[in-house]
Image (cartoon, rainbow, N blue to C red):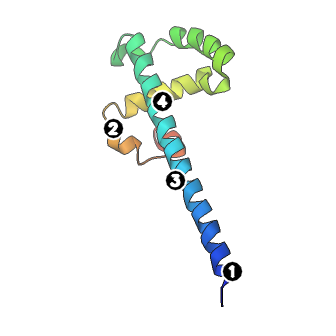
Amino acid sequence: MKNYYEEIAIVIENIEVNRRVRELQDNSEKLQAYWNIGKLLVEAQGGYDRAKYGDGLIKKWALKLVNNYGNSYNLSNLKRYRRFYLCFPKGAALRHQLSWTHIKVYCL
C-alpha cells in the first residue's frame, strides 16, 4: 500500500532543501558583490589609509547609485561595504562562511 503522507513529505523536503540552497547562493553572491564594492571604494579613495577618512566621494556616489539602483546603495550601506572590505581584505574563504547579518554584527 502506498504511503501518500511520506511521498508528500519527501516533495516538501526537496522544496525546502532547494529553497535553502538558493538562499545560500544568493547570500554568497551578495557578499561577493558587497566586498567588491567596498574594495572599489577603498581604491577610489586612494587606498586603505585614506579610505578611513574622507567620505565626500561616497556621499556623491551614494546619491547617484540610489537614484539608479535603489536604497541598497545609500550612504550608510556604502560605508558598510567599505568597512566590510577593510575588515576582510583577504578573507575570501571567510566571507563565504558568513551571512551579511553576521558581518554587520561582528565587523560593522
Q: Is residue 5 left or right of residue 42?
A: right
- Residue 41: percent from left, percent from top: 45, 17
Q: Are marks 1 and 2 in contact (CB under 8 Å)?
A: no
Q: Which residue is mark 1?
A: 5
> What's the amino acid at mark 1?
Tyr
How far apart are the two marked residues, 4 and 3, measured between alpha carbons? 18 Å
1 left or right of 95 in image: right
Compared with residue 34, is residue 97 higher up or lower down, i.e. above or below?
A: below
- 61 w.r.t. 5: above or below: above
Tell me which numbered mark, 2 or 3, is placed earlier along the sequence. Answer: 3
CA distance separating discs 1 and 3: 24 Å
Closer to the observer: label 4 or label 2? 4
Q: Which residue is mark 4?
A: 33
For marks 1 and 4, give the CA distance.
Answer: 42 Å
In the structure shown, which secondary structural element does the residue marked by tag 2 occupy? loop
Amino acid beneath label 2: Gly
Is label 2 in contact with label 3 (beta carbons under 8 Å)?
A: no
The residue sitting at 69% across, 80% down in the picture is 5
Q: Position of residue 90 (x, y in %)?
A: 30, 33
> Which residue is denoted by mark 3 in the rendering?
21
Q: CA distance from mark 2 to mark 3?
A: 22 Å
Residue picked out by circle 2:
91
Q: The N terminus appears in which quarter of the rendering?
A: bottom right
Mark toward the start of the polypeptide (1 vs 4) = 1
Mark 4 belongs to which amino acid? Ala
Between 50 and 73, the one lying in front of the other is: 73
